Amino acid sequence: MVAARDDRPFDELVERAMSVAPARGFRAALDAVVASGDIAVISEIKRRSPSKGDLASGLDPIELARQYERGGAACLSVLTDVDFFGGSVEDLVGAREACSLPVLRKDFTVSARDVCDARIMGADCVLLIAAALDQAELESFLKLSRAIGFDALVEIHDEAELDRAVAAGADLIGVNQRDLVTFAVDTDRAVRMAPKMPAGVVRVAESGITGPGDAAVLAGAGYHAVLVGEHLVTSGDPEGGVSALRSARRS
């Protein structure tokens, strides 16, 4: 399917993005938790999965954001994709207003206008998936995100994408353990990739994290943060789930 042409004046979008209230500091929030000795938890608000369907009927993003904050989450991730994940911009706006945590807009960022849109809606971090972008796009979107005042999480899957992310200047890199095509989870992928990341990069492990045991393994491998959605959304106790994940490094 071909995306609809976006003819909005780009300069006006940049101006709007730069005029919103300052971002909360996504990477800074992760750094603060890591300095305390815990692994940082990026708790995700996720209504559905392309492979599993609905995850939590009646999910309330506002209440869930508050539970995550009480549990000690460092940041939020909010799905805004409608077609595959059942999310919305309203989910992000409501969740962010309900708490003090920085928020990642979790969506498919494929244009410079998408980067601006994330900042305009209030996101404190934008997701850049290396597999969906060529090198020029990755570099320009990173530069743009910094110019308009917020962080960018560059998501990778393998060594070649890591090289691209580092070459682009990424300082916040997530390793997605789930294949974007098959949805299969390779739990060894993040552990394999961790020692290959250079110093100064905040390392985030994404997908397939099912509890404190997984978080402890990833912390031991050198990750600073874990991004967890499905496990927390379906746990029945999101607040306790975050607290248990965050203590994984200590245990």
Image (cartoon, rainbow, N blue to C red):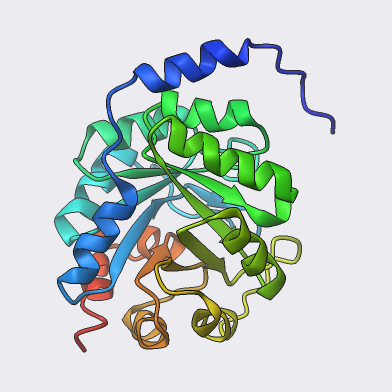
Residue 189 position in % (x across, y down): 60, 81
Tell whether 127 sits left or right of 24.
Answer: right
Residue 165 left/right relative to 87: right
Residue at left offset 62%, top offset 30%: 112
Q: Nearer the viewer, residue 48 or 31?
A: 31
Let me know if residue 15 appears in the view.
Answer: yes
Residue 54 vs 193, above or below: the answer is above
Q: Give the percent coordinates (x, y) of residue 71.
A: 18, 60
Residue drawn where x is 29% and y is 36% of the image: 96
Residue 237 appears in the figure: no
- Which quarter of the rendered picture does the C terminus lie within? bottom left
For the point 35% across and 72% down, the residue is 224
Q: Position of residue 80 (x, y in %)?
A: 51, 37
Which sits in the foreground, 148 or 72? 148
Q: Quadrant of the N terminus?
A: top right
Write down the quadrant of residue 220 in the picture: bottom left
Q: Is residue 109 above or below residue 240?
A: above
Q: Quadrant of residue 211?
A: bottom left
**Which quadrant of the view contains residue 234?**
bottom left
Vertical placement of residue 250 versus 113, above or below:
below
